[in-house]
Image (cartoon, rainbow, N blue to C red):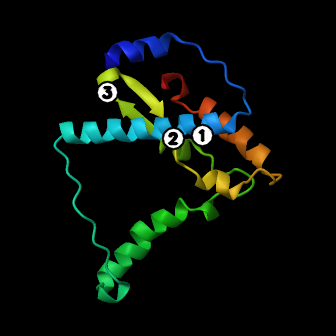
Amino acid sequence: QELWDQKQEDQLEIEVDENDWTYLHELAVLFDKHKLKTEAEDNVKAGFVAPPKIRQNADDLSKEDKKKFLFGEFQKNMEESVLAFNSDGSFLTPEFIAKYFKERSEIDALEFDFHSQWKLFKRFPLHDPARQLIVDKFVDAIVMHPRANEIT
């Protein structure tokens, strides 16, 4: 029954106004739920169970662990933080775009998965004059990426 309902829904064409943000938000939430469900199912199939992550206070870390943190995980987080998004768009490199590629070997596909990446648009809100430049450069960076023709 569920497959039949899904097939019927797939055949329906829905006309949605571009400015119907409530509907578009609901659609995005459904997408995220589906994506999380798919990823969870893939992890279960692969036998992966995430270990609980226990954070340590910096006082409890050794000198070596502090170095690893500062020049490893912390530096990576800073590079991906809102501060790394400069207003000239120079961060929109092929390497930046490639971080969001997801290989789907089971269906021989390459996906560009940028959902839930709110940092970019938090850095450039609607009223920011640089937003249009960033959006244009973002699209160009995707379209001009060396692997752009592989994206499904």
| Front disc: 2 or 3 | 2
Q: Which mark is residue 29?
A: 2
Work out how far the residue at label 2 is from the one at label 1, CA to CA, in angstroms.
6 Å
Q: Which quarter of the rendering shows the N terminus? A: top left
Q: Residue at x 40, y 68 (%)?
A: 72
Image x and y of residue 8, in percent: 44, 11
Image x and y of residue 36, in percent: 38, 41
Query: Is residue 113 visible to the viewer in this orientation of the structure?
Result: no
* Residue 106 appears left or right of 122: left
Assess disc 1: are there few (<14), some (14-19) or many (≥20) residues with their C-alpha within 10 Å of its C-alpha.
few
Q: Residue 18, relative to residue 79: is it above or below?
A: above
- Which image quadrant for residue 20? top right
Q: Amino acid at mark 1?
A: His
Q: Find out whether the residues at labels 2 and 1 contact each other: C-beta distance under 8 Å.
A: yes
Query: Is residue 121 visible to the viewer in this orientation of the structure?
Result: yes
Image x and y of residue 25, in percent: 60, 40
Q: Which residue is mark 1?
A: 25
* Residue 135 appears left or right of 110: right
Q: Which mark is residue 99?
A: none
Q: Residue at x 48, y 23 (%)?
A: 152
Q: Nearer the viewer, residue 125 or 77?
A: 125
Q: Nearer the viewer, residue 102 or 90?
A: 102
Image x and y of residue 57, in percent: 35, 83
Secondary structure of the residue carrying numbered label 3: helix
Assess disc 3: are there few (<14), some (14-19) or many (≥20) residues with their C-alpha within 10 Å of its C-alpha.
few
Q: Which mark is residue 105?
A: 3
- Which image quadrant for residue 43? top left
Q: Nearer the viewer, residue 130 or 119?
A: 119
Q: Amino acid at mark 2?
A: Val
Q: Find out whether the residues at labels 2 and 3 contact each other: C-beta distance under 8 Å.
A: no
Q: Residue 117, relative to residue 4: is it above or below?
A: below
